[in-house]
Amino acid sequence: MTPPDSSTPTSLPDADPRRRARFFEIFESVPRGGPGDPASTRRALAMMTDLPAQPRVLDLGCGPGGGSSNLANLTGGRVTALDLHAPFVVQQAAAARAAGLSHRLGPVCADMRDAPLAAGVFDLVWSEGALYSIGFRNGLELCARLVRPGGYVAASEVVWTVDAPPDEVRRWWRAEYPDIAAIDEKTAAVRDAGFEILGHFTLPREAWWDHLYGPIRARLEGLRQTWADDEAGLSVIAEFDTEIEMFERWGHTYGYEFFVARRPDR
């Protein structure tokens, strides 16, 4: 289950307004919209050896929680936090206020495909698990347009981590996100977009359990009784249960690959 323009790899909520409402109600109450953890954020940033002291950062598909504030704090820069879902943007702004970083965070509610952003102005375009929502290659092209020459792009994308995934998990992913592919194929997509790859790594399992599925599972347990007579809510819970079960059983066959790349100066 995935917030549009946000994180986690699986399918977007459908057009049923009741299911969409329940879906977002779950995500608005958890700290992240997808796999990730502070150590991986710092690891990615450490690859950017000459990031300006006060960089202009775009958190593209920022999702819920306070990730944009964390980027502002770690980079020392000004962060534009963009997401299609307005409550996520509000959460980022609230987290910035709580951290005393409001002056360095600019919230924007917009579809990333039509983002009201000038081309080539950002020193860093950051997008954790969100580019899938418009297709990873399309997302990389968008990043290439928005980042300045010599600037950085950091993006995570779901990948197979084994050569021959079992049929069950392959069928599930084919329904949820057909563009899942091997790490080499995603690496080639980054290069095809014109970037120089500085490094990449697979997110650890803790990035899924501790920072995504653990909070979601706790949230679901609190909602099962509340939504006992809510067919839409229960159907959304069932889909989350399936997703978590798939990761419990087959999480060793897939993961998120975090790519750090640079747009050439020329």
Image (cartoon, helix red, strand yellow):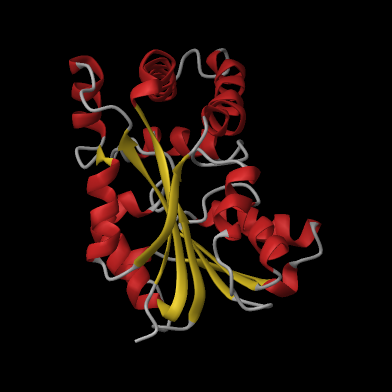
Q: Is residue 68 left or right of residue 119?
A: right
Q: How many numbered marks are there?
A: 0
Q: Kindly identify the residue that appears in the image at 59 percent across and 74 percent down.
A: 51
What is the x, y in percent for residue 96?
72, 61
Q: Is residue 135 visible?
A: no
Q: Kindly identify the residue that appears in the image at 42 percent across and 23 percent down.
A: 240
Q: Is residue 232 left or right of residue 34?
A: left
| Closer-to-camera residue (122/33) | 122
What is the x, y in percent for residue 59?
52, 62
In this view, 258 is above or below 107: above
Could you tell me which quadrant the C terminus lies in? Answer: bottom left
Q: Residue most toward the bottom?
A: 266
Q: Kindly identify the residue that appears in the image at 58 percent across and 69 percent down.
A: 49
In this view, 87 is above or below 229: below
Q: Is residue 33 left or right of residue 98?
A: left
Q: Is residue 56 visible?
A: yes
What is the x, y in percent for residue 196?
36, 67
Q: Residue 171 falls in which quadrant of the image?
A: top left
| Closer-to-camera residue (91/131) | 131
Could you tell me which quadrant the N terminus lies in? Answer: top left
Q: Is residue 160 left or right of residue 203?
A: left
Q: Kindly identify the residue that appears in the image at 55 percent across and 52 percent down.
A: 88
Q: Residue 188 falls in which quadrant of the image?
A: bottom left
What is the x, y in percent for residue 6?
44, 49
Q: Residue 37 falls in which quadrant of the image?
A: top right
